[in-house]
Image (cartoon, rainbow, N blue to C red):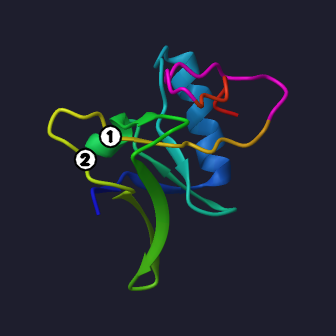
Amino acid sequence: MVIEYVGQIVRQVIADMREQRYEEEGIGSSYLFRVDQDTIIDATKCGNLARFINHSCNPNCYAKIITVNSQKKIVIYSRQQISVDEEITYDYKFPIEDTKIPCLCGADSCRGSLN
């Protein structure tokens, strides 16, 4: 285990409203991570360092949803040994959409987009 992704637990409808508000407020990035169909963790304003972990098409970590005391949590685990000064990354696995988000990970196996 590397770190838990923490923030406010909100429903999808609240996450949609917040995402729109963040855009209107000029907040360049929002940190919304889907736990399941109805639950989102919003780390935009009250998260930890996990929200700053970048995407890679060839990551050294992966995200896993676990249940602790009947509460779902997102935990980042390492796939391999990680060296000091090595960037921690995982695959965001965004859903496929028509509008592509360019990937800048630089991996040899880069897919070219996050979705």
Q: Which mark is residue 88?
A: 1
What distance separates the C-alpha of mark 1 from that of mark 2?
A: 8 Å
Pick whichever, 26 or 2, lies toward us.
Answer: 2
Q: Mark 1: which secondary structure? A: loop
- Find out whether residue 103 is within the magenta segment: yes
The answer to whether the residue labelled 1 contacts the one labelled 2, judged by CB atoms less than 8 Å apart, is yes
Pick whichever, 20 or 53, lies toward us.
Answer: 53
Instruction: Please indicate, yes or no, whether residue 38 appears anywhere in the rendered image.
Output: yes
Tell me the amino acid under the disc marked 2. Answer: Ile
Question: Which residue is tagged 2?
Answer: 82
Specify the quadrant of the image occupied by residue 102: top right
Indicate the quadrant containing the N terminus: top left, top right, bottom left or bottom right: bottom left
Which span is picked out in magenta? Answer: 97-108
> In the image, is 72 to the left or to the right of 52?
right
Residue at horizontal 26 percent and vertical 41 percent from the top: 49
Residue at horizontal 69 percent and vertical 62 percent from the top: 37
Instruction: Please indicate, yes or no, whether residue 47 appears anywhere in the rendered image.
Output: no
**Label whose residue precedes the other's in the sequence (1 or 2):** 2
Q: Position of residue 108 (x, y in %)?
A: 54, 26
Residue at horizontal 70 percent and vertical 34 percent from the top: 115
In this view, 75 is above or below 95:
below
Q: Position of residue 95 (x, y in %)?
A: 73, 43
Pick whichever, 16 or 75, lies toward us.
Answer: 75
Pick whichever, 35 or 58, lies toward us.
Answer: 58
- Find out whether residue 56 is within the magenta segment: no
Residue at horizontal 49 percent and vertical 34 percent from the top: 56
